[in-house]
Image: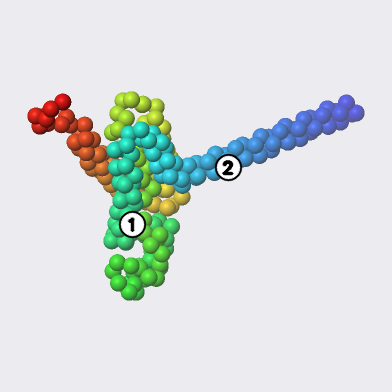
């Protein structure tokens, strides 16, 4: 009888120890997941800023591309705000009824006095910015640095997924923003390349003495 009780106590003790280890492991897992989620959120939130700074560093010795990229980034931001105000599509997190009511009672068609312009979500500014940077650096570097281009694509993907996952934008809003960013990058790169060709073009012979 005593042996049975000892075996039973040992068994219960072992179960308790295993249970405590499981709780400890689950706690560690939750901490790790929360940390990864925080990193994911911040990367998505500050992805555009990070890629802009990184691009400026990469282009610091390519003066023409540097200037055009920086100016294009500013114009792209203005274009995004203009399109948001013109399209007036709310973010997924904004209550549709409240948004429609604010639009209905707005003082004019260009400025919604009842709600913040930040309520507009079409197109996604984050998606437009990261894809503008990614496409531009791809066109400039081409095959010079594949790893860097893959890094840009990773940050862009994280940013786009984060905007949808946290309901900052709908899937359509990030798709449209991405396309605008890509197209605008091609335009800016084309203008920069033409300017560069003009600078590098050999001066015509004017028959001047050496």
Q: How many numbered callouts?
A: 2
Q: Which mark is residue 120?
A: none
The color scheme shown is rainbow
SS of the residue under disc 2: helix
Is the residue marked by circle 2 packed among few (<14), some (14-19), or many (20+) residues within 10 Å? few
| Quarter of the picture holding the N terminus | top right
Q: Residue at x 29, y 54 (%)?
A: 79
Q: Which mark is residue 34?
A: 2
Residue 34 visible here: yes
Left or right of residue 69, residue 206 in this image: left
Distance from disc 1 to disc 2, alpha carbons, whole Å, reads: 33 Å
In this view, the residue farthest toward the right is 2
Q: Residue at x 16, y 29 (%)?
A: 202
Task: Quickly name the residue at label 1.
Answer: 81
In the depicted structure, whether residue 196 falls above or below residue 147: below
Residue 172 visible here: no
Left or right of residue 198, residue 130 in this image: right
Q: Quadrant of residue 51?
A: top left
């Amino acid at each position: 009888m005593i042996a049975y009780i000892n075996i039973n106590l040992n068994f219960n003790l072992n179960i308790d120890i295993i249970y405590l280890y499981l709780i400890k492991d689950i706690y560690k897992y939750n901490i790790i997941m929360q940390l990864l989620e925080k990193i994911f959120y911040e990367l998505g939130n500050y992805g555009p800023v990070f890629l802009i700074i990184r691009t400026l560093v990469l282009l610091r010795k390519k003066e023409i591309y540097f200037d055009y990229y920086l100016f294009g980034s500013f114009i792209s931001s203005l274009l995004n705000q203009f399109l948001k105000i013109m399209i007036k599509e709310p973010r997924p997190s904004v209550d549709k009824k409240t948004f429609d009511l604010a639009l209905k009672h707005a003082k004019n068609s260009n400025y919604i006095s009842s709600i913040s312009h930040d309520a507009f979500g079409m197109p996604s500014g984050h998606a437009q910015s990261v894809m503008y940077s990614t496409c531009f650096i791809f066109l400039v570097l081409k095959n010079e640095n594949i790893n860097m281009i893959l890094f840009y694509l990773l940050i862009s993907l994280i940013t786009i997924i984060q905007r949808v996952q946290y309901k900052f934008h709908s899937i359509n809003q990030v798709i449209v923003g991405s396309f605008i960013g890509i197209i605008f990058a091609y335009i800016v790169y084309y203008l920069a390349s033409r300017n560069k060709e003009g600078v590098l073009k050999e001066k015509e012979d004017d028959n001047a003495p050496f």
